């Protein structure tokens, strides 16, 4: 008899092996393992896990279906709430959401909700199950800006309600951060991301790529000339931040966005693709979020020795635990409580090293985290030929500066109501990183979902007026 | 897909294409650029718009093949299509937002070098359509590499100079500028220079001495072109700017050209270096250490 306090372990690629390839790290549960894990769920009446889920998936119900072996039913339960279960099962920070609230977690391991979700979604795909489409079409047009997690979710929900939805995507490929940001080894593109996008399309959503809202067409034109009755802005985060330290414009310094976009969207790691990437022999990644972990583990797979430099301690690392754990297993060096002060440049203008200073934690700052303070005379150098800056982003001004009457806050993020995504402009809703600044896939999905409700209420009320 | 309605070789290794892209054609202005991608495996190639027809919904691009993807691009024929074609990107030229009355009072000089002649054209044409006649210098290595001469003649006072003297004036664009100002009694209130980085560097050096405000169009390494990757950052004065959203046009007197040239070399292949050497050898004054002109 298995120990009910322990979760069923999930199979993973061996660290030494996977450090050299881009295949998915986590192999997921098979049917037997999934059923065995599902049995651990207590099916709480007042399920805390649902409260922990930004898109409120009915977790106990889908897990119960898994327990009974009704995987297709489990999939339909999940897809009532989530447009991208195969993605969420892989990239959500479950430890601080559903699994963090699981009663099983008080005495032992919480139920592996994420791995179960992933199993169900993958099973549905393998068996050709698609989400249910709307029974009646309303014939009313809604435009969604950005085919990332927020946009896909909003579009999917609106399509299920019968709206005629078109997503406008700036890049040549849909998916947003799922395509350009999160690497193959964490989120396979053709097997998972493209399939999830196909699911959204199967609901009737149209996706027009290569359209930059604010440049190719404006929101006002969509509303006035192209017949859209409402617009959802899910345009994502924006320009990468740099530190402003000496040497930052040297060759070999780039943003994590650039590095990951070259690798993931442009597939520079595959020989047959034209886009080049600087692989680096010794790479420093500055930052401690999920994006930093993705950049570090990508650089490692391209053959580099990798150092992650983060100014606070391990406890404050913003990345998901699983990512940090995987990165360490794969052999990435963590320089914690360390901050770069200068990038060292050779006489040809290329990076040759990074000078850092050790830090200690002082009093808590506005974010509630203890503020890192420099330790005097503790500077040291690390020899590197490539530096990847992963410090977050500032909002892209393209939409806010070209849309009349759309208010932004002090940080230039679009102001939108958390409940329903409503902005200062009538008929225009927003959510995801464009509103919150860089956050997670699932929070963006939650915002897309809220905005879909907001848009539905708005259009229903508008209809009553005429 | 974005259909190519006309594909034409303008000169040795310079190609022109008219592409069906209604959303771009409807909104683009002189100074802006597009990104084209031939097929699934190609790079995203940023190219400044050379001309556009709003009614026909078409955009014209002119390019010089330099890497694998542009080599593939040049093989596209009339009737073929780009898989992706997005724009307009970047900010329009500052001329577009300036009141025409103000522009009419100004004496404006355009300096175009090599394939950089193409992005100068829509600006000169736009001014002409608004009743402003500018002067323009087209510089090319040799006679056969002078492009768009007839089109320019219709919309401005044109001076053509070739490095080897095989056509019209002899010498580089800076020599022509020097002659116009010092021997032919011209004076200018504004200069717009677009061409190889090294040309823009030396034009800016000269116009700074002459006290002529100068705008240049930067074409740094880009990936997405929408303000996401930060690859296109350039130092303008002591500020970091992103060419894709803040540019591509900047005050030439504030640009750190040496650094920009150095960054441009980041992904340059041996093949690319050889091409650039061919392109820039005659106009190269040495010093950047990357394009191969001083080897």
Image (spheres, coloured by chain):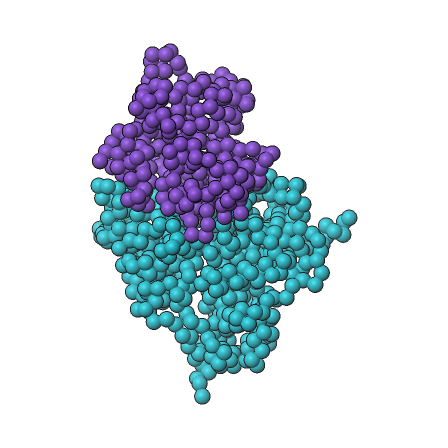
Chain colours: A cyan, B purple
Q: Residue B171 or B174: which is nearer the viewer?
A: B171
x then y, percent, for residue A177: 47, 55
Figure check: A33 above or below A91: below
Quarter of the C terminus of chain B within the rendering: top left
View extreme (right): residue = A466
Residue drawn at (55%, 23%) of the image: B129
Image check: B164 left or right of B242? left
Res. B274 image quadrant: top left
Image check: A297 left or right of A182? left
View extreme (bottom): residue = A1
Figure check: B185 above or below A165: above
Residue drawn at (39%, 53%) of the image: A273
x then y, percent, for residue A367: 43, 55
Image check: A237 left or right of A325? right
Residue drawn at (65%, 44%) of the image: A226
Figure check: A140 above or below B271: below
Residue drawn at (42%, 52%) of the image: B41
x then y, percent, for residue B225: 45, 43
x then y, percent, for residue A21: 35, 64
């Amino acid at each position: 008899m298995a120990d009910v306090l322990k979760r069923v372990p999930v199979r993973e690629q061996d660290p030494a092996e996977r450090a050299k390839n881009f295949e998915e790290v986590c192999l997921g549960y098979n049917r037997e393992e999934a059923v065995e894990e599902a049995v651990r769920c207590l099916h709480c009446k007042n399920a805390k896990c649902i409260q922990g889920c930004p898109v409120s998936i009915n977790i106990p119900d889908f897990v119960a279906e898994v327990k009974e072996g009704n995987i297709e039913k489990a999939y339909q339960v999940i897809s009532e709430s989530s447009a991208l279960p195969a993605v969420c099962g892989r990239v959500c920070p479950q430890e601080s959401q559903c699994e963090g609230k699981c009663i099983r977690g008080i005495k032992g391991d919480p139920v592996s909700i994420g791995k179960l979700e992933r199993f169900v979604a993958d099973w549905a795909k393998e068996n050709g199950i698609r989400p249910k489409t709307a029974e009646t079409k309303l014939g009313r047009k809604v435009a969604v800006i950005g085919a990332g997690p927020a946009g896909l979710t909003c579009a999917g929900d609106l399509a299920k309600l019968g709206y005629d939805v078109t997503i406008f995507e700036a890049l040549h490929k849909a998916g947003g951060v799922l395509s350009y940001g999160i690497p193959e080894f964490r989120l396979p593109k053709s097997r998972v991301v493209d399939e999830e996008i196909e699911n959204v399309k199967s609901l009737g959503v149209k996706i027009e790529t290569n359209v930059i809202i604010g440049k190719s067409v404006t929101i006002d034109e969509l509303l006035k000339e192209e017949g859209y009755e409402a617009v959802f802005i899910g345009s994502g985060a924006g320009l990468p931040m740099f530190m402003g330290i000496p040497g930052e414009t040297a060759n070999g310094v780039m943003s994590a966005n650039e590095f990951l976009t070259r690798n993931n969207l442009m597939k520079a790691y595959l020989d047959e693709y034209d886009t080049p990437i600087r692989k680096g022999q010794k790479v420093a990644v500055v930052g401690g979020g999920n994006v930093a972990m993705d950049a570090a583990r990508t650089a490692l797979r391209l053959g580099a020795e990798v150092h992650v430099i983060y100014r606070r301690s391990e406890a404050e690392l913003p990345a998901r635990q699983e990512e940090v754990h995987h990165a360490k297993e794969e052999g990435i060096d963590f320089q914690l409580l360390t901050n770069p002060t200068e990038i060292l440049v050779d006489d040809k203008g290329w990076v040759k090293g990074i000078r850092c200073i050790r830090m200690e934690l002082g009093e808590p700052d506005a974010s509630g985290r203890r503020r890192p303070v420099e330790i005097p005379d503790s500077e040291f150098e690390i020899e590197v030929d490539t530096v990847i800056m992963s410090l977050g982003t500032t909002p892209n001004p393209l939409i806010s500066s070209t849309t009349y009457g759309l208010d932004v806050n002090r940080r230039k993020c679009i102001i939108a109501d958390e409940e329903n995504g409503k902005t200062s402009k009538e008929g225009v809703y927003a959510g995801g990183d464009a509103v919150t600044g860089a956050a997670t896939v699932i929070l963006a999905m939650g915002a897309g979902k809220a905005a879909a409700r907001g848009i539905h209420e708005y259009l229903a009320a508008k209809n009553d007026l005429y | 897909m974005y259909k190519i309605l006309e594909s034409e070789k303008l000169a040795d290794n310079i190609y022109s294409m008219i592409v069906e892209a209604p959303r771009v054609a409807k909104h683009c202005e002189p100074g802006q650029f597009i990104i084209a991608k031939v097929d699934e495996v190609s790079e995203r190639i940023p190219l400044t718009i050379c001309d556009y027809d709003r009614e026909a919904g078409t955009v014209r691009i002119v390019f010089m093949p330099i890497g694998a993807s542009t080599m593939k691009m040049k093989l596209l024929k009339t009737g073929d299509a780009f898989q992706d074609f997005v724009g307009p990107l970047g900010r329009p030229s500052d001329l577009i937002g300036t009141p025409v009355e103000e522009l009419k009072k100004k004496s404006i000089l355009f300096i175009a070098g090599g394939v950089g002649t193409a992005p100068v054209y829509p600006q000169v044409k736009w001014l002409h359509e608004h009743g402003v006649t500018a002067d323009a210098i087209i510089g090319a290595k040799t006679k056969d590499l002078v492009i768009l001469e007839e089109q320019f003649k219709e919309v401005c006072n044109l001076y053509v100079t070739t490095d080897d003297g095989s056509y019209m004036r002899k010498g580089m664009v800076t020599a022509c500028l020097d002659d116009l100002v010092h021997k032919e009694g011209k004076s200018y209130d504004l200069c717009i220079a677009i061409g190889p980085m090294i040309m823009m560097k030396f034009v800016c050096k000269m116009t700074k001495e002459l006290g002529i405000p100068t705008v240049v169009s930067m074409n740094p390494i880009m990936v997405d072109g929408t303000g996401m990757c930060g690859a296109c950052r350039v130092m303008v004065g002591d500020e970091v700017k992103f060419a894709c959203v803040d540019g591509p046009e900047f005050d030439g007197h504030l640009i750190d050209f040496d650094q920009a040239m150095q960054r441009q070399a980041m992904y340059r292949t041996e093949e690319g270096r050889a091409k650039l050497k061919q392109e820039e050898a005659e106009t190269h004054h040495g010093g950047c250490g990357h394009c191969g002109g001083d080897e």
